[in-house]
Amino acid sequence: MLLKPIAHIETCFPTKFGVPRQAGIIGTPGRIVFEPEYRVAEAVRGLEGFDYVWLIWQFSKAVRDDWTPTVRPPRLGGNQRMGVFATRSPFRPNALGLSSVRLERIETHAQLGPVLHVSGADLMDGTPIYDIKPYLPYTDSHPDARSGFATQPAESLLEVCCLNDCLSTLPPDLRKPLLEVLAHDPRPQYQHNPERVYGMAFAGYEVRFRVEGDKAEILSISPAQ
C-alpha cells in the first residue's frame, strides 16, 4: 500500500522540544495546507459543519527501519517498559500518529486553495498529513473508558512568570499559547536541574527559560536567528 501526503501542517514548533505531549491539551494554532493536487474546494465541502477533525499523520522525524516491541513512555518517567501498542510512542512499526484537533475555520486561499485553521495540534511544523476525517462525538467519545497507566494528566501545571516584560516581544495571539506550553513543562521528565537554562524554538522566536519547583521563569524571548 502506497501512502502519500495530502497536506502538511504549519505549527509553532520547528523542533520536537516544546510540542504538546497530547493533542488538545494546549490551544496552539496550526494551519493545514493541502498539497497541490488536493487543493480542491469540493474535497472539504461539508467539513465546516464539524468542530473537530481527526488527523492521520507521520512521525516524520522518527522514521526508521527497525522496531522494538517495548518502549519507555515518558508518562512513566522513562524507567518502565510497556508494549509499543499500549503507548503513543513515535517509535512504531509504522510511524503513524493520530490526533483530534479543533477546526477553527476554513480559509479559501487564492493560491493554496482551502486551508484549515486548527488549534490543539501536537505536531511539529511541516509534519505530513495522510488523511483528515471528521470527529463524531456520538461514536468517537467514550468518557467512561479505562485509560490504563495514563489515568491522569501527566503533570501538574507550573506557574509561569516573565522577566522584564519580555512577553511583549511576541505577537499578542502567541502569548497565551506560549504560556500554556511552559505551564505544561516541556522539559524531559527526567530533567529537574533548577539551574539549567532551556532554549525552545517557538513560532520564529527563541525562548529561554528555567524551572525551579513549581515555577517556570521566562528569561528572554528574541527573534530566531
Image (cartoon, rainbow, N blue to C red):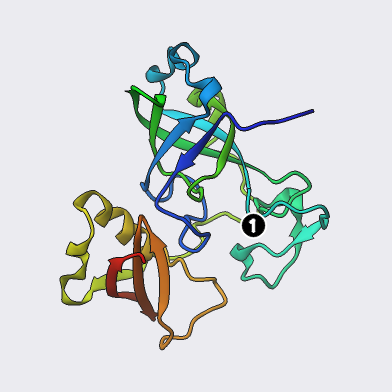
**Is residue 205 among the parts visible in the rendering?**
yes
Is residue 140 depicted above or below 26 in this figure? Answer: above
The one nearer the camera, 171 or 68, is: 171
Q: Position of residue 30 (x, y in %)?
A: 40, 41
User: At x 19% / y 52%, what residue is drawn?
Assistant: 172
According to the picture, the residue beneath numbered tag 1 turns out to be 149
Is residue 87 found left or right of 170 in the rendered image? right
Closest to the observer: 4 or 214? 4
Q: Position of residue 95 (x, y in %)?
A: 70, 46
Give the residue type that dot 1 points to: Phe
Q: In the image, 95: left or right of 156?
A: right
- The kind of secondary structure element at disc 1 is loop
Q: Quadrant of the C terminus?
A: bottom left
> In percent of the image, x 63 and y 48: which residue is there?
59
Q: Position of residue 64 (x, y in %)?
A: 76, 54
Mark 1, Cα crowd under 10 Å, few <14 / some 14-19 / many 20+, is: few
Q: Residue at x 66, y 62 (%)?
A: 73
Residue 18 position (above or below residue 45): below
Q: How many marks?
A: 1
Camera-nearest residue between 132 and 134: 132
